Image (cartoon, rainbow, N blue to C red):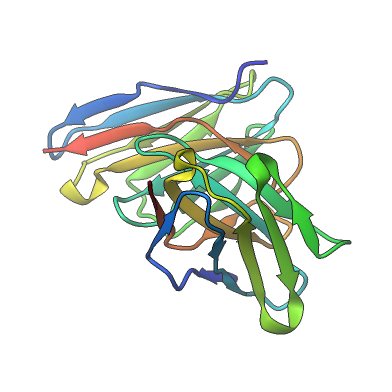
Amino acid sequence: DAGVTQSPTHLIKTRGQQVTLRCSPISGHKSVSWYQQVLGQGPQFIFQYYEKEERGRGNFPDRFSARQFPNYSSELNVNALLLGDSALYLCASSFLDNEAFFGQGTRLTVV
Amino acid sequence: AQSVTQPDIHITVSEGASLELRCNYSYGATPYLFWYVQSPGQGLQLLLKYFSGDTLVQGIKGFEAEFKRSQSSFNLRKPSVHWSDAAEYFCAVGAGDYKLSFGAGTTVTVRA
């Protein structure tokens, strides 16, 4: 079975631009969560979606948004990028709450 | 709100020696506890989890962890470390809902 897949693996954006990150969950998983991992820190929770509805949101500004599609894949959007948004963005899918399986992440660099 | 503290930022251990990584959590009820491992530039791989029952949990790659409610701890151990165990290790706590809270991580270096 394929694991959680994320695309792209790396990208570089300029301050003020917008970015969209994509995630495909493990087959059969209906929950997708997004985490931000800044270099040298642990992952921080951004969003969770279940059955296309937002179930939770972490302490992130409104520049961050997400959605989940009927096939349970998900997109994370970040507008008006700041240098501080440079991080590894991790997507996790779950069948049961709290048993999260992570993808390889998207490394975003903002210059 | 739940939180996790990993007191050791960096641990160096010789190959073949034992390893113990500390994790302390803060949560009012019975927590869901996890250990993940992350190789450089990679995602997180689940080593083991504790939800309830036996407080000594066995995981993959020869790792085990023990839940001690009285100490609010969930320390990770491995009897004999291999060079491939060099990585960053994260302890995480969940409240049975959708969110995991992670510690800052412990970097493990294995010397020959």
Q: Looking at the image, which residue is at 38% across and 28% down?
A: A21
- Residue A106, given in percent of the width and then of the height, sits at 36, 31
- Residue B61, given in percent of the width and then of the height, sits at 63, 40
Q: Looking at the image, which residue is at 19% across and 29% down?
A: A12
* Front residue (pair B103, A58): B103
- Residue B46, given in percent of the width and then of the height, sits at 62, 42
Establish if A105 lies above or below A83. Answer: above
Q: Is residue B98 left or right of residue B104?
A: right
Of all residues, the one furthest to the bottom in this rendering is: B70
Task: Give the image quarter of residue A42.
Answer: bottom left
Q: Looking at the image, which residue is at 52% across and 56% down?
A: B17
Establish if B101 lies above or below A85. Answer: below
Q: Quadrant of the N terminus of chain B?
A: bottom right
Of all residues, the one furthest to the right in this rendering is: B53
Establish if A56 lies above or below A22. Answer: below
- Residue A105, given in percent of the width and then of the height, sits at 42, 32
Q: Is residue A107 left or right of residue B97?
A: left
Establish if A18 lies above or below B50. Answer: above
